[in-house]
Every structure is written in structure tokens, then in C-alpha cells.
Amino acid sequence: MQRYNPKDIEPRWQKKWADHKIYEATENTDKPKKYVLEYFPYPSGAAMHVGHVRNYTIGDAMARHARMNGFNVLHPMGWDAFGLPAENYAIKNNISPQEAIAENTAKFKRQLTQMGFSYDWSREINSSDPAYYHWTQWFFKLLLERGLAYQKESLQWWCDFDKTVLANEQVEAGKCWRCGNPVTKKALKQWFFKITDYADRLADDLDKLDWSEAIKSMQRNWIGKSQGAEIDFAVDGHDETIKVFTTRPDTIFGATFMVLAPEHPLVHKLTTDEQKQHVTTYVVAAEAKTDVERQETDREKTGVFTGSYAVNPANGEKIPVWVADYVLYGYGTGAIMAVPAHDERDHAFAEKFNLPIVRVIKNEAADEEFTHEPGTLMNSGEFDGQDSQAARENIVKTLAERGVGAMVTNYKIRDWLISRQRYWGAPIPIIHCEKDGVVPVPDEDLPVKLPKVKSYAPTGEGTSVLASVEDWVNVKCPKCGGPAKRETDTMDGFACSSWYFLRFADPHNDKAPFAEDKVKFWLPVDDYIGGTEHAVMHLLYARMWTKVFHDAGMIDFDEPFKALRNQGMILAPDGRKMSKSWGNTITPDEIIEQGYGADAIRVMELFIGPWDQQANWSVEGMGGCYRFLTRIWTLTQEYLEYSDDDKSSEAGHDELLRAINAATKRVSQDIDSMGFNTAIAALMECVNDLYKIKATHGYADRDTWRTVLQTLIQLLAPFAPHITEELWAALGNDSSVHLSTWPKWDEKYLVTNEMTIAVQVNGKLRGEVKVATDADEATVTDLAKAVEKVAAHLEDKELVKTIYVSGKLVNFVAK
RNA sequence: GCGGAUGUGGUGGAAUGGUAGACACGCUGGUUUUAGGAGCCAGUGCCGCAAGGCAUGGAGGUUCAAGUCCUCUCAUCCGCACCA
């Protein structure tokens, strides 16, 4: 008998699938469509490891299963090729980014191919291809036209290692998301996308998405929508007013001081001569602090008095105005009314600087000096006795009538900074003219291609290396023909990935980013599979762009990803993240080389645990999955060898059909609910059953065995595409198992004529009885009472109640 | 601090309120001259000779019956974090 040898089988079928293009998707069919997508990868220098592979294995199992279930499946793949890793890799290896990307995509594609993933490679895209970024630039212009792209000079996060600015989303705990270098602030004129215009919809529409609660809450948290009021406080002896944002206008009578952020423009105006020295020292020190340092102060409150007083518009009292860095200039209005009795931070500040604390909320549940809970108002003049909720509205209404207050909604999210001072990105299609100012590059001149340069290393001067390519930079103004210069910054790579899922519907279109009917046919993405790392970056940006295209009338949906599936991370066997620095990465290549094959890896990726929970890779477990495939291989090969035998009989017929129908039912239902690990367990059980049947009856019932084996192979096909294709062919099928129709089960094979009933006394298991399936309750309970151990426990007791759960158990309640 | 998740054998994990531990790893024993990362069969939660008892992070509760529902609590992981 031929041994199971994945090294021989797998490449052979991979080639055949490619040659016959069996995974290519077309619009010409009556079948319902299904778009299954995994995040398109960043082709970095390091090869993919088994953690990455899990992502694609889940998507591929879903795509294959959908295909066999009659769906017209789009399952594409491409490359998120622009960005820092490729550029850094190129600099390090002294090659061009173009060469680096070619090298790395080839490597990644080989890795994906050897895993047998069913991608439609005819739709392969690459975001660094001018044919692709042509349309990224076109979308930049669309955003500009719609008032959603603008330039602003401001202090921005700057990574001195990567020599570029970063968006807020790309700074994690004060460090660069790419390299971990602490970021600093740098004043530069930069391009932004106005994601804040979409903050409300981005927050609200989360409710209609089938996404994990974890990601939704991360996005909600990031958007940071909060309802409140803006209130103007007049400054005593000045024309100035201080505008504050508060979510608790009901506590305004308790506002006993105010605090300005150190960066607030009023700080200098309001500071008195006596206080000038203190304030200046404080502000300078605060500005010198990095974000990390501000967080390291352990929340010990610091601040200084400006010398000025504001007037509380609620009660006319004069309250001191302070400067403190616990108030953030970037949020709200950069100034607050401090209510020390009902806000923890204000409370700490007041205690430290001996400022008055006036309680204005009574709360019976928390009847203490300090509470942040809502309650009933006190010390609040005409509003005394109102509850917080009503008081909020009434107080703001009163202030609004005087023109010093209004209800507003505030967001934490900031506009998306997209300029990058690096070479390897899509050039921003803008020309700066001395006369006409900012002029977009006309459509007919797109794409603005990246010029060849000698060195890719960033200058760190706040411009990309493109600034030094003079014959590229210096152009004629498209409007006036006068001297002008190109924008030399490139776009954030996340711009490219904000629309790639649309391009897959029409990847080779050179007249438009996509044909609207094709996008209408395929989109939105039905299942988007990936990790949580993009929660507040890619997934937020892509949602925004989709809404922009929707508003522009290009598409008829406003959410790109109906269902988001976040797979759990695969950790190294030592429980740590796989990384080069730990030296604990495991690649599929080495496992395939060892002879286990891609199919066993795929089974392992899914069987290791629930797909959405993290798991440690296990070398031993890998062996178990290989063994499972070997058992199916052996079973089928033995069958084929014995099939010439003419001693055909019915022996084992019923058992065979019961085993395979039970498996079909469980596997079908489990895959539908993404229970891949239990689906594989059901297949293992079925194989164990078949071995037992074989041991008893041999392969006597040849026809039934053939049906059973074929069905088993179909059920396994989404998980292990190569071995199933090989055995499917060996059983005499001409066309691919992956184009076959998913098997159905028949309940009639699952009924037995005998059932086992558990017998409990007072909820404790005391025995079991075997009865005919159609036995009535009285028969069952009589038999149950007669069970020796049951009788023993019922002795000397009064039977109070008998519970019979049909077909399952009997519970005698006795005292 | 806020938000999200997760706690079950030696290990990964199964269990529409109805026999806790499916399936697999590991381990133990058997078997086949067996060299193959072997295969096949059986056993394997803990205590106990047994009867039986104890077991799903902990404590209560609801129920004939709780891993599952409710209340409180502890631990771990992830995200955000002085957001007014």
C-alpha cells in the first residue's frame, strides 16, 4: 500500500488547481454570492509563521465550505505593499523598495500557495503598483473635493527613528506603533482626512455590525462620543470668556475654580503680573514634557494660579482660574469648570491646593462628601431638589437663554493625519503653485508615479527624499502654467488599505477605481477575517472611506464589512508571542519540510482550540493531526485494495450509515457556527467508528463503504484540501471534490431502537437503563426504580416527585 | 480607574438548564518480527479495597436538576487611560 506522502500529493494538486483555475470567481451565475476576505498582508522580510497561517486557514475553510454549499465565492488575495517595513528592509539590504516588495511578495505567495489556499489569483493586487495607487490618488482628490482633506500646520507626533509623523491611532502609549521609539512633537504643515466629520456615524453604525464586542468597544472608546454642554464663563475684569465642556452641567453650582490647559491661548492673557513668573515656568515645563512623561507623573496633580478670576454664570460667584496639565488642550475646549465635590480629579486638585469644595448633589446610595454619581441637587438655588438628569437640561436651557451655554456632543477622535515624510508610499497628488496655491493634479495626469531615487533613507528634515528630486518636484502649475512644486510627502499606507476590498471586485479596471455594478455584485464583504491589531486603525479608516464613497453616490452600502471575525493569536509553545527576537517562530515551511504537510497544519490550526481564542502551538498536537489524516488515508487505501473482493454483503450497513450521517450532521452544523475544532473532532470520531466497523465486518458492504468514504472526504475537504482531492480521485471521481456538493444527512439513519436513560435520585446519578425507543414514561420509570443502586437509595424514603426528561433521564425526588 | 474577554483533568479543550471531561496530546498496559516520526486494541479527573464521597477560580442563591441562570467576589489576559 502506498504511504501517505503529502510532499508528493500537495504540490501536484496545487498546480492542477491553478492550471484549471477552479477558484476563479465570475459574476455570471445564479448562485448567491459570498465574499470571504482575510486582511491582505504586509509582505515583510520575515516569512509568515503558523500564527499568520491560522488567519488564512479559517478564511479558506469558510470559502471552501461556502463554495460546496452552492455559493458563488469571491476569495481574493493581494499585497499591502507600501509602508515603512518594506522601505526599511530595502535600506537595510541595499536594494530598492520595489525590489524588496517583489522579493517578499514572491516569498509570501509561495507560502500561501503551499498551504493550498483557494485564492482567485487572477485578482491579485498590489497597493504599490501604479495601476493601483492611481486610484488611491484619485480618492485623495475625491476627499479633497468633498472638503474632507485639508492641510494644517500644527504640532504633530514625530517618530525620530522612522523620521516621519504619525497619526494619533499610530501612537501607542506614547510610542511609535511600528518601532516602539518614544514619539516627540514637531511642528509641520500636514495633510489630514476629516474623519471627525464621520465620528457620529462611525460610532452609531457599530450597532448594526456583526463584529466582536471587543472591537466595537475599542472603536467606541477611540471615537469617544460624549454628550454634554459648552458653557461660557466670563472673566472678571476682562473681555475674555472661558469656554468649557462638561458632561455634568447639573453640578455647575459646585464649580469653585477653573483650570486651563497649559497650551490654552488664554493662559498668557489672564496671567497677572504677580503670577507671571510662576505660570511661565510651569507652562514651559509642561510643554517640555513628552506624553510618556506626563503619564509617568503618577497623576500627582500640579498647577499654578493665574491670578485671574472667572464668574460662575450659575451663581455669580468669583472663582479662581488655574493652569494645570491634568487638563488636556486637545480635548473639549482645553478648559474646565472644576467641581471638586463631584469629580475625582478636581477633588484631588482642590485638596492639594486648598481650594473650596462645595457639595451640590445628594445621593442616598453614596451619601458622602464626594460622589461622582448623579443624584438630587442641593445648594443650587432654584434647581434644588431636581434630579441630575432633569437639572442638566434645565440648567443648560437657562444658560442658553442668556446666550452662555448650549448642549454639544464631544469626541475624542482627531482627524487622521496622512502625510508621511517617507519615500515608499503613494505620492499625494497635489501641486503647490506660488500663485494658485494648492492645485490638485488633473485626472489625466494620474497616477503621479514615484520617481527613481538614489537613496531611500529619510532625511529627518521634515520632508521625504522626494524633495531632493528636482526634475520631479519642479513642475508647471496645471492652472496657470507658472512655476510650481509637487507635494513631496506620501500618503499613509492605511489610505491604500482603506479601499482595497472594493478593488478586488474589479481589479484590472484602468478607467475607474472599480465598475459600480461589479462592486454592487460582490460587496459588502460577508466575512472579514483577521486579528485585533487593526481595531482602531485600518477598520476605522476603511469604514470612513466607505461612507465617503456612499455619500458620493458610488456605492449603495455604507459599511464595508458585514461580519468581522477576529481569530485568536497563536503563541509559541513557550506561551510567548512568536518573534525573531525570542527565536521561537515556527513556520509552515519547516513543518511541511518535516513531512507533515500543509493539510495537517491546517487541521492543527483549527483543531487547536476555538478559532477566536488564543492558543499555544503544540508540536505534539501536530503529530496527532497528521495521524488523523493518515488513518483516513489508510482506511481508503485498504478499501480500494479490498474492493475487488466479491464477497459483498450487507454486514455493517446500518452502522456505516449511522456513523456517516451523524458526522455529516455534526460537521455541517459545527461549520455553520464556526465550531471548526468540534467539526474536526466529529470527523475523528467518525473515523474511529469506521475503524471499529472495519474490525468487525471488514469492507464487506462495498457500495456503502464507497458512499461513506466519499462523504467523509467531502466533509474533510474544507480543512484538508489536498489529501481529500487525492482520495476523491482515487475513488474514481473525475472532477474536483472542491466543486462537489456538500453532503446532506438523513435523520432516519440516526434513530436507534434502543436508548439509554440516566437515572438520578435527588439529582445524583445512580445508574442507567436501556429501553426501547418508543417506551412510555411508566415503563421507563418502573425499570429505573428497579435498578439495584436506585432501589437502594430510594429505600426508607418517600418518593415525592418523579421527573422524566423524554429520552434522556429520570430523576426521583425522595425524602 | 473605564471597557472587553477568560477561568473545567497532567495538557489543549467538549458539553440547547438534564449522565461534566466528547475529541486530541501525554501517560500506562497489551498486541503484531514491527525499524515506520510506527500501526492496532484497551485503560486513564481526584480520594477510597469497596460502598461511596469530592470535583468546572471562590462564596451565596434560584431549580427536581447549575460549568451553564442570578448576586457578590478573586485571579489572569487584552484594549483605553487625567477625555472633564
Image (cartoon, coloured by chain):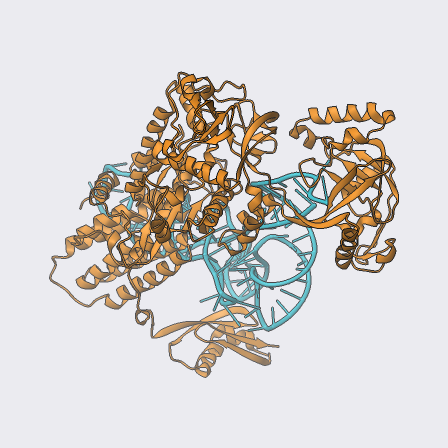
Chain colours: A orange, B cyan
Could you say which is closer to the camera, residue A465 or residue A485?
A485
When asked about the image quadrant of residue A274, the answer is: top right
* Residue A78, placed above or below residue B7: above
Q: In the rendering, at what x and y percent does residue A12 appear?
A: 21, 40
Q: In the rendering, at what x and y percent does residue A148 appear?
A: 53, 40
Q: In the rendering, at what x and y percent does residue B49 appear?
A: 50, 58
When asked about the image quadrant of residue A70, the answer is: bottom left
Could you say which is closer to the camera, residue A801 or residue A457?
A457
The total of numbered circles placed on residues is 0
Q: Is residue A520 visible?
A: yes
Q: Is residue A409 left or right of residue A763?
A: right
When asked about the image quadrant of residue A657, the answer is: bottom left
* Residue A108, placed above or below residue B18: above
- Residue situated furthest front in the rendering: A480
Q: In the rendering, at what x and y percent does residue A242 appear?
A: 77, 39
* Residue A414, placed above or below residue B54: above
Q: Is residue A713 left or right of residue A413?
A: left
* Residue A700, placed above or below residue A531: below
Quarter of the picture containing the C terminus of chain A is bottom right
Q: Is residue A786 left or right of residue A664?
A: right
Residue for point 51% across, 40% down: A537
